Structure formats: structure tokens, C-alpha cells
Amino acid sequence: MGSTAHAATVIVTNGGTATFNASKVSTPGSKVVTFNGAAPAGVVVTLSGASLVTGSVSGQYAQPFGSDGSRYLSVFGGTSATIRDILVPGYKALSFYLGSIDTYNSFQLLSKTGSVIQTFSGSAFLGGPSGNQVLPNTNRLVTITRSNGDPLIGGIRILSSQNSAEVDNVRFISAVPEPSTWLMMILGVGIAGAALRRRRQTIAVSYA
């Protein structure tokens, strides 16, 4: 399922074990925050009343459907969590695994300087009854991609007005070069390689 919201394309994939496992795979140029151990280099996680938890506690938080039982982020009512990469200038896309989606959850995309560039409510990602803990369409992988020419993503802030927003596997995804960009890169590498070979030949002749 996909939709366009302002300057971003949002794709949601129904949850489950396979989707959860896919959500934590690191691809070239990406960084994944799994909340298990240290965050990737340059990534700062700031918890303002939110907590890293496991399992489920009635009325407090629920383990995302399909997850592996490891730690995840629970953003309680009136609290927030901010995940930013202060090292990389920005990313084209960002994804996260969202459990028991509630309409009162909020998600702010941040620029590389930390300012808010776009805000989503939980209802933007919801495909079933609000807060349901076991349905694939209320526990989803959310991928947000910025349009060409728009500010790149530097992070995300998660808020909730009630208990709770449950999030795991926040993934920063680098832009994929366009075919024309790939061509220029290949040509550039080829030219540089040819110049290096010629320089080596010249040096070899001069010292013969």
C-alpha cells in the first residue's frame, strides 16, 4: 500500500515475522537502530520519558506483532523519543517497524539540523482497528521517502498523547543514484583509471 503525503511517499507493509526480520536488515549506505546494544556511528537516541522495553504490560505497552522479542522503543503518553544521525548530511528515506498502531501516535520527520519538515499521525499508517496488537495491518513496516529536491531526512521524533507508540528497527536509508548518476560515476571511474594507467606508463618510461 502506498500514498503520497505532501512531499513524501509513504509505503506501509503489513507486519509479521518476515516483515520484521526484513526491517532490521542493513543495506549499503543505511544505518539501523535496533535498540539492542550501541546505536550506529553518528546516531543519537534521546529518550524524553520514553523507555526501551521488552514484552508487554497491559495498559502500558505491547510487543509489536511479529517481532523477535528483543528490546523496542515504547513512547508513553506525554513523552517523546528522538533518533537523529548527526554525522551524515541527510537521507532520502527512513523506515521503522510500528506496533499496535494508534491514531494518537505522532511522527515528526526532522531535517539534518533537527527542524521538523513533516508530521504524520498514526492514522496515516493504520489499516485496521486502532491499537490492535495482533493484526498484520495494525503492526506495520512504514517507509517514508522524500521527493527529489526536498530537504533530506536527518532523523525522526516519535510522540504519543496516550500509552503508547511502540517502535523498532529505525532505518536510515541513503538515496539510490539515478541511472544517469550511475553512468556519470562509471565514466568518472573509467577516466580516472585510464589517467592512472597512463601516468604509470609515463613513469615507467621515464625511469627506463
Image: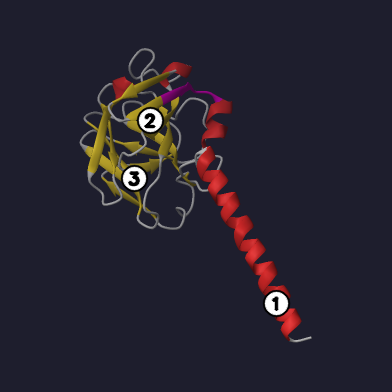
**Relative depth, front residue between 99 and 27:** 27
Q: Quadrant of residue 199?
A: bottom right
The secondary structure type at the circle numbered 3 is: strand
Picture residue at 41% right of the left edge, 38% below the top: 94
Q: Residues within 10 Å of mark 3 (few under 14, many from 20)?
A: many
* For residue 130, above or below residue 97: above
The secondary structure type at the circle numbered 1 is: helix
Mark nearest the camera among 3 and 1 is: 1
Picture residue at 36% right of the left edge, 33% below the top: 147
Q: Please identify the dominant SS of the magenta region.
A: strand
Picture residue at 54% right of the left edge, 48% below the top: 184
Q: How much space separates mark 2 and mark 1, taking CA atoms?
A: 72 Å
Q: Quadrant of residue 128?
A: top left
Mark nearest the camera among 2 and 3 is: 3
Residue at numbered disc 2: 57
**Relative depth, front residue between 58 and 27:** 27
Q: Is residue 113 left or right of residue 44?
A: left
Query: Which portion, as a residue range, is magenta?
Result: 11-16
Q: How much space separates mark 2 and mark 3, taking CA atoms?
A: 28 Å
Q: Is residue 102 magenta?
A: no
Residue type at tag 3: Gly
**Relative depth, front residue between 129 and 206:** 206
The secondary structure type at the circle numbered 2 is: loop
